Amino acid sequence: MSPLAGSAPIHGRWSEHHRPVATGAQTARCSITRTTGDGSLDGDGVWHPPTSAAVYTGPCRITAPSPSRVQVVGEQQTAIADYEITIEWDAAEVLEHDLVTVTSAKDPGIVGKQLIVTDIRHATERFERVLKAKINLTEPEG
């Protein structure tokens, strides 16, 4: 219920008004790809991985809001952090398991990292797209 008859507590264009601010805070750049197909073996028994299709390339913001947890990978304990990634609100649809590659950032330690999307956050007001992701542990670091 509105506090005053005929008024809304949130303006109808609230999200639209805040989108430039959200995009302005996205100071890194990312590319998001999606694996297509299953990969294959050729006649010589050489494995050819599936191809990837571009989903998004543009500004992003990456934060690690939650503390790391320890997970056993192989026989080694590895700290796993959940990352929050925001991209432009009107970007193409991103799906779980899409791969995010950080192409530039003010923190050089995250440039080149690959993260796997684990969740897509939805909300009633939308001024940026919010993704949850974790570091891709299946690829060796370059």
Image (cartoon, grey):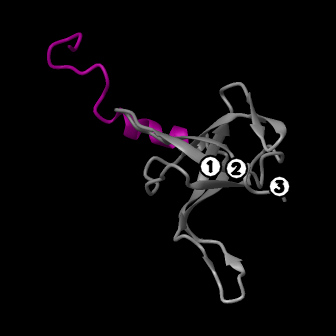
- Name the residue beneath numbered marker 2: 136
**Callout 3 crowding tier (Cα within 10 Å): few <14, some 14–19, many ≥20:** few
Q: Earlier in the sequence, mark 2 or mark 1?
A: 1
Most distant residue in the top direction: 3
- Corner quadrant of residue 125: top left
On the image, numbered disc 1 is attached to which residue?
Answer: 116
In the image, what residue occupies the spot 66% across and 48% down?
115
10 Å crowding of disc 2: few (<14), some (14-19), many (20+): some
Say whether marks 2 and 1 touch (CB < 8 Å). yes
75 or 132: nearer the viewer = 75
Q: Position of residue 122 (x, y in %)?
A: 41, 37
User: What is the spatial separation of the Cα atoms under label 2 and label 1, in whole angstroms?
Assistant: 6 Å
Which quadrant, please, contains the N terminus? top left
- Name the residue tied to disc 3: 141
Figure check: 136 above or below 79: below
Task: Tell me the amino acid under the disc marked 3.
Answer: Glu
Instruction: Indicate the quadrant where residue 48 lies.
Output: bottom right
State left or right for residue 17 relative to residue 11.
right
